[in-house]
Image (cartoon, rainbow, N blue to C red):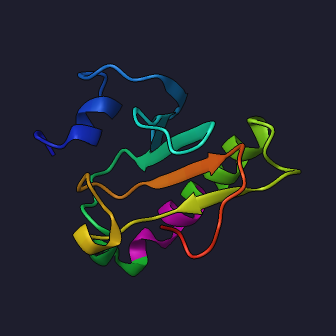
Amino acid sequence: MADCLFCMIAAGKIPSKKVYADDRYYAFEDINPQAPTHVLVIPRVHITTLNDLTPADGPLMGDMLLLAARIAKERGLGEQGYRLNFNCLEDGGQTVPHVHVHVMGGRRFSWPPG
């Protein structure tokens, strides 16, 4: 999608601190980190919200979670723990209309979140 912030970041039109890139995913450092480690993992294909997923997106999303876990482990969070977070729509905390998962760690998280 031409005017999507995350699509433009993945295409290299907006600078980011790249963590990982391949033909299906792009991962980068969050510009407003909520933890010592805070990486966003996005699919390169534009999907606006979790509500827009279809059964055909199952493999894409499953592989995205595997990638998020791999990034967490590579960042040294595998032993102490980490949080993977999806937000959906405004009340769910989604601020960018492009499906993404937050990989956060390096501090203790509480439940429920604030």
Residue 72 horizontal/vertical position (percent): 71, 45
Residue 15 horizontal/vertical position (percent): 32, 19
Which of the two residues, 65 or 95, is positioned nearer the viewer here? 95
> 46 above or below 73?
below
Residue shown at 63%/36% (left/top)? 36
Query: Where does the magenta region start and end?
Result: 56-63
> 88 above or below 48?
below
Residue shown at 49%/46% (left/top)? 41
79 relative position to 11: left or right: right
The answer to if 101 sits in the magenta stretch is no
Q: Main secondary structure of the magenta part?
A: helix
Residue 83 horizontal/vertical position (percent): 64, 59
Residue shown at 26%/70% (left/top)? 89
21 relative position to 15: left or right: right
> Would you identify the image quadrant in which residue 97 lies?
bottom left
The answer to if 58 sits in the magenta stretch is yes
Residue 14 horizontal/vertical position (percent): 26, 23
| Residue sitting at the far left | 3
Residue shown at 83%/49% (left/top)? 78
> Would you identify the image quadrant in which residue 76 lies?
top right
Query: Count the marks: how many?
Result: 0
Which of the two residues, 102 or 22, is positioned nearer the viewer here? 102
> 19 above or below 35?
above
> 109 above or below 17?
below
